[in-house]
Image: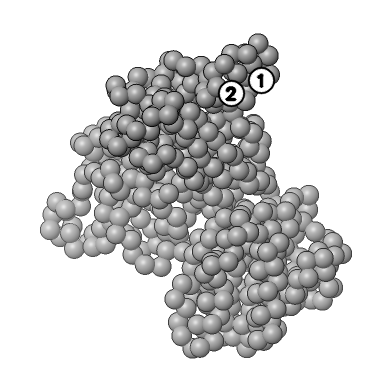
Amino acid sequence: MRLCHPRPDICRAAALAAAALLSCAVGSRAAGTPIPHGTLELVSENQWIAPGHTIHLGLHFQLEKGWHIYWVNPGDSGEPPRVTWQLPAGVRADEIEWPTPRRLGTSSIVDFGYEDDVMLLVPLRAGVGAAALGAGDGSVQLRGEVKVLVCREMCIPGKAQLSLTLPVKSQAPEPDAQTNGLFAAARKAMPRPAPATWRISVADARDSFSLTAKLGKHIAQASFFPLEESQIKNAAPQQFTAVPGGFRLTLQKSDQLLKPIVRLKGVLVLAGDQGYIMDVPVNHTVAARRDDGGALDFVAASPAKRDWPPLQ
Amino acid sequence: MNRSTLYRFLVILMLFAVPLLIAAAKVGDSAPEFTTTASNGKTIRLSDYRGKFVVLEWHNNGCPYVGKHYNSGNMQRLQKQWTSKGVVWLTVLSSAPGKQGYLTAGEENDYLTKEHAAPTAALLDPTGEIGHLYNVKTSPQMVVVNPQGTVIYSGAIDDKPTTDLQDVQGATNYVSLALEQAMAGEPVQTPATRPYGCSVKYKD
């Protein structure tokens, strides 16, 4: 693996001076760029890109204690980080994959986001035509501008210019030992697809949604994070009721929700902080269906990949 | 009434009173009455403005989302545009003392002068009472009340939830839309949106 690019000679010389190393992108790991009350680093899971293959990049945020950034649905205030990529032709970044968020704040205002250390994942695909990319010196420069709002009691908008240079090869990309740990942790923090055996239903109950989950096991606690804004009252307590083989959550509707919604999407977090992706139709005619025996009440949680996450 | 009956009565009264206190106004509800002191020293009562459109603008001078609209001149432009058409524009400061955005009357007056702001009045709400009455989450959240005293809009100032000055241009301003539609006798097409911005720095 190359240590530095595009001028390895300069980098080797600089390696003697420790401070100068900071400005050099080292293989699949660039130095952290300062953002308000933290740093942001662009990392790659793989040592190189290859035409026809998708690799993952990571936006690794490290924040000072007490400061936070936001999930794709930020909740009552704030906004999620946004990236504008500048990529060579033939290379495309997909939408951000968001780790399971945390509830921030306990008062009448509740946000969804991350504290301390978090990595957002970005799939990066090199098209088959990308073979010509490495024609020059056999590498590509991946650049992105990140706008991020960092908040504690107050909020500070930040901007970071990120850059990472990766070789282009024809063989399938190999993982990078330097970043493996980071990506393993990031994957662990991601919500998983809900198991196919789970039966999750959502009923529209006038001022609230009643979410019933039958998982075939006893569940002690659960909470729901709505993917879309303005559907539920973020700050309202989510009333948890154990039911045989699962639980029911009562979610108060948002004041901004003036029309019925077709589906409720989000992340269901069970004890142990494991998040599960949930995307189920909302049943507006519970009473009528109960008369039919309730067979249609339960619908498998089947998140179609293209539906997740629909928000940039 | 003996003591225990009185006690029971009080407990029941409290059980009812608490939900009433926290039931905040939303679109379609009648706008909750408030009385407060403005930075110019005047006592402001919402009901004094019955018969007029009233805009409530939640303010925090340290919030970058508020800064976007003041540094670009957008908020001042809106204030002038709508007050010239007879709309009452009330800027509300719900930050608690010691928190970001809290200003004394004098400080707020200096701010209004410096920013060439032109609201009808700036209301000091350090207890957060008015903010909670209207279920306000962020600055700059905006509320529009019609001449009949009904909340006809509550939410974001526009459709660009960012801190970038260049996003002001080309944004759809929900406050202006609500006022234009209501003044034309039409229903407000977008009466509620997610109010973007900084969380209101309420008293803990």
Residue position for label 1: A20
| Mark 1: amino acid | Ala
Task: Name the residue type under label 2.
Answer: Cys
Give the percent coordinates (x, y) of residue B64. Answer: 67, 54
**What mark, if any, has residue B54 been given in the picture?**
none
Residue A29: percent from the left, percent from the top? 51, 24
Q: Residue at x 45, y 58 (%)?
A: A230
Q: CA distance from mark 2 to mark 1?
A: 7 Å
Tell me the SS state at disc 1. Answer: helix
Q: Which residue matches tag 2?
A: A24
Q: Quadrant of residue A88?
A: top left
Residue A288 seen in the current view: yes
Decide: is A186 above or below B198. above
Q: Is residue B117 left or right of residue A8?
A: right
Q: Label 2 crowding class (10 Å Cα cut-off): few <14, some 14-19, many 20+?
A: many
Q: Is residue A267 visible?
A: no
